[in-house]
Amino acid sequence: MTLPANGRQRDLRHICKLVCSMTVISSTKLNDVFPIPARGASKLRSKSSEIEIRRAHWDDPSSWLSGLQDVSKLFLISSARIEKDFNSAPPGKGREEDHFRALEAAKKVGVKHVYYTSLAFANPSLSGVMKAHERTEEYLQQQKDFKFTIIREGLYNESWPLYLGHYDLPGGDDRTEVVVAGDSKISWTSIRDLGLANALILAAPSEEYEGKMFYLAQKQAYTMKDVAEMVAKARGKELKLKVLDRESHEEYYVNERKMERPFIEWWSKTYDALKQNECEIHDNTLEGLLKSRGVEPTAMEVTVEEMVGSSRGFTGR
């Protein structure tokens, strides 16, 4: 499997329990430090003597050739280099360029099956964040050199601050009103639950998921307004949601919140997708996999309470 610089260690922990032999490939920029701390790496190895940790760089195709040697199943987590997507990146120049390098290497070394983690938006989507995913999915669907599975993951429970007006959780955000550019129900899904579900998929016979695209998302869905109310309850302070048109939203975050325009213009298209209800997912796959292990999905309220609660008392950087 590949692990981007932003981590997904919970996927690793679940996979370690179900897959005996595994190679972990850390995908980083050339100057990045290894994203798995030494203590974390030793813990991974302690789970199984069959775990090998390698490193590859998105900008170095040869590192993927060596990193993927003798790998039969590739679990590819998308590139975290979102800046490549900014300013309406043309085909082949967004984050999909990173994915293509890894996938071309996979073809050359004889990888048998690629599992790609995408996002739970509509197909096609109005969002900017899905553009690289859609281009990668299209690439996979045209391949004859290896089997593929496309896993569209529900928006992470833990990512709510990004959607809720770039809420500054570590900084103790004291706003009583957050501005967004759209709202609708979202099938929020915890990283922990996705880790277990993905591990079960990888451990299953390859033909069980070959050539399929499906969603891993909770059936229970909440709006951003619902999430704002959860945050208000957890912090003991009112928090309202204000919905503006996309242009006004962009100007507010660039001029008032002093955020970078390329990022804001890229991200704001997410709300166009929300207004079309793209992220309310009706797919039983996740909950079926969890049930097979006697696990209930993690409630959004629990995640919000834990995240807001852990930030209490923080006075600033």
Image: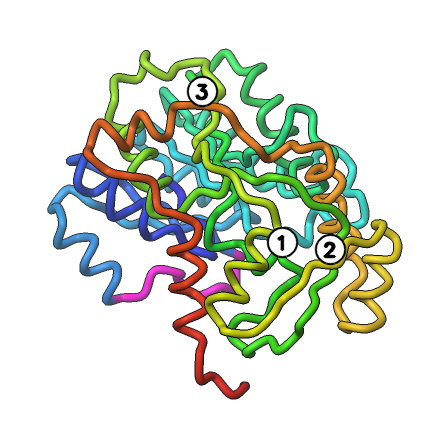
Dot 2 amino acid type: Val
Secondary structure mostly seen in magenta is loop
Give the residue displayed 23% in from the left and 66% down from the top.
39
Task: Describe the element under mark 2 as helix, strand or loop.
Answer: strand
- Hey, what amino acid is under mark 1? Tyr
Nearest the viewer among 215 and 114 is: 215
Q: Which residue is mark 2?
A: 180
180 left or right, relative to 295: right
Quarter of the N terminus within the rendering = top left
Asked if residue 110 can be seen in this view, the reply is: no
| Residue at left offset 60%, top offset 75% | 173
For residue 217, above or below residue 182: above
Contact (Cβ within 8 Å) of mark 2 with mark 1? yes
Q: Which residue does the image show at 54% across and 86% down from the upper left? A: 316
Whole-angstrom CA distance, mark 2 to mark 1, is 8 Å
SS for dot 3: strand
Identify the residue position indicated by label 3 in the image. 148
Q: Position of residue 58 (x, y in %)?
A: 53, 47
Residue 163 is labelled as 1
Spatial CA distance of label 2 from label 3 is: 36 Å
Callout 1 environment at 10 Å: few (<14), some (14 to 19), or many (20+)? Answer: many
Q: Amino acid at mark 3?
A: Phe
Which secondary structure lies at badge 1? helix
- 2 and 3 marks in contact (CB < 8 Å): no
N-terminal label among 2 and 1: 1
Q: Could you tell me residue 40's position as x and y percent? A: 26, 61
**In the rendered image, is residue 271 in sight?**
yes
In this picture, residue 146 sits left or right of residue 269: left
Query: Left of 165 or right of it: where is 141?
Result: left
Q: Quadrant of the C terminus?
A: bottom right
Q: Earlier in the sequence, mark 2 or mark 3?
A: 3
The x and y percentages for residue 104 are 52, 29
